Amino acid sequence: MSTHLLDHFSTQLDQLKQQGNLRQFTANLQQDRYITINQQRMLNLASNDYLGLAADVQLREQFFDETPNAQRWMSSSSSRLLTGNFPEYEQLEASLSHAFHGRAALLFNSGYHMNIGILPALADSKTLILADKLVHASMIDGIRLSTAKYVRYRHNDLIHLTQLLEKYHEDAAIERIIVVTESIFSMDGDETDLAALVRIKKQFAKVMLYVDEAHAIGVRGERGLGCAEQYAVIDEIDLLVGTFGKAMASIGGYLICHSVIRDYLINTMRPLIFSTAQPPICMAWTGFILKKVLSMHTERQHLAQISQQLQHRVQSLGFDCPSSSHIVPVIIGDSAQTVEQAKALQQAGFYIMPVRPPTVPQHSSRLRISLTSKVDFDDLKQLENHLMRLKHAG
Ligand SMILES: Cc1ncc(COP(=O)(O)O)c(C=O)c1O
């Protein structure tokens, strides 16, 4: 390739660097609740392993002891519709279905596949999608790949959502309206009022709810089934999705829905039809983890307690922090300043990542603290002291 062709890309990279928005991979080594980068060992506060299960060596040993070599399939070698539908898939779907009140369950290779696949399959030109302004990029990509018309409503503003529903619901050209949101938002750590959302849905016959529980599965509800369980609305959410890559210590996505929707997606959803299914061993591992997660009440309770303490502390220090969950952002605003502050916290032994545009809106760069049940009250105390210093220095 001639340097002339590369110039365009290197100029863009230079611009990102100047704005403090350049992203790079870092080699890391993870152990229990710590992460080591460039030989520096830090408390891992950037992990999605919310229940500490991915880092649990004993758990892995138990799984491998119970799984003979003959069952350790490392590839499915095909889409599920050809030869890839191993028993592990059906077993996991059956377990999910059992946990989620007998509703149908369908699995996907990742949460990203799930969100870019379901929406285009279900939403045609007679569909309107109303999406929260802050939904994850995977849902935005799914919306863009669909032929539906779409409108964003102000973040977590259910009054604005209702106004839009009143405006569009009687339009004869619109046959279905899909309302798309997250339960716990990945970057702000705040929550949708799912009970209120369900009440709104009941007023409009054309509405289907699509709720992504990526950050709530494992963490919320008596059995860890998410905010839908916590607020007793599992049966009311038409398309209840989530991922296994976070608290569930595995990989993949799931949908809980009506069996008609499941059958329809098996026939129409392109990432499901045209991609090799996950290795069966991953499905077996997810099934193994699911059984554990259902009874991890103590860990969930601890995570809720440390989360509340940190939210209050960050807010009382005067930082902008909308969180009501284990994802606790400290919003700084300026990207370069956020990167500097993240570096200072890392030097002090806390691995906290700066999150910048385009992942979050312009001028809302933040330190994203992501708590796991492995963090204890002593860790919090030390972190709070450093945040206080940072506030005073700023
Ligand atoms: C809300 C939400 N949905 C979906 C995804 C994608 O899930 P996965 O990592 O399994 O592809 C993420 C990942 O960060 C997410 O935060």
Image (cartoon, helix red, strand yellow):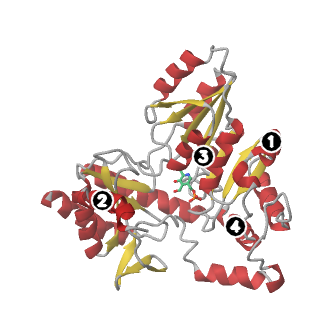
Q: Amino acid at mark 2?
A: Thr
Q: Secondary structure at mark 3?
A: helix
**Disc 2 and disc 1: Cα gap in Å?**
46 Å
The residue that disc 1 covers is 264
Residue 11 — which label? 2
The residue that disc 3 covers is 230
**Residue 165 rendering spot, x and y as whole percentages:** 56, 21
Question: Residue 142 vs residue 386: left or right?
Answer: right
Q: Nearer the viewer, mark 4 or mark 1?
A: 1
Q: Nearer the viewer, residue 276 or 133?
A: 276
**Disc 2 and disc 4: Cα gap in Å?**
43 Å
| Vertical comparison of 97 with 199: above or below | below
Question: Residue 291 vs residue 19: left or right?
Answer: right
In primary-sequence order, the first of circles 4 and 1 is 1
The residue that disc 4 covers is 286
In primary-sequence order, the first of circles 3 and 1 is 3
Task: Kindly identify the residue that appears in the image at 62 percent across and 48 percent down.
Answer: 116
| Vertical comparison of 3 with 151: above or below | below
Q: Nearer the viewer, mark 2 or mark 4?
A: 2
Q: Nearer the viewer, mark 3 or mark 4?
A: 4
**Disc 3 and disc 2: Cα gap in Å?**
49 Å
**Disc 3 and disc 1: Cα gap in Å?**
29 Å
In primary-sequence order, the first of circles 3 and 2 is 2
The answer to whether residue 222 of the structure is visible from this angle is no
Q: Secondary structure at mark 2?
A: helix
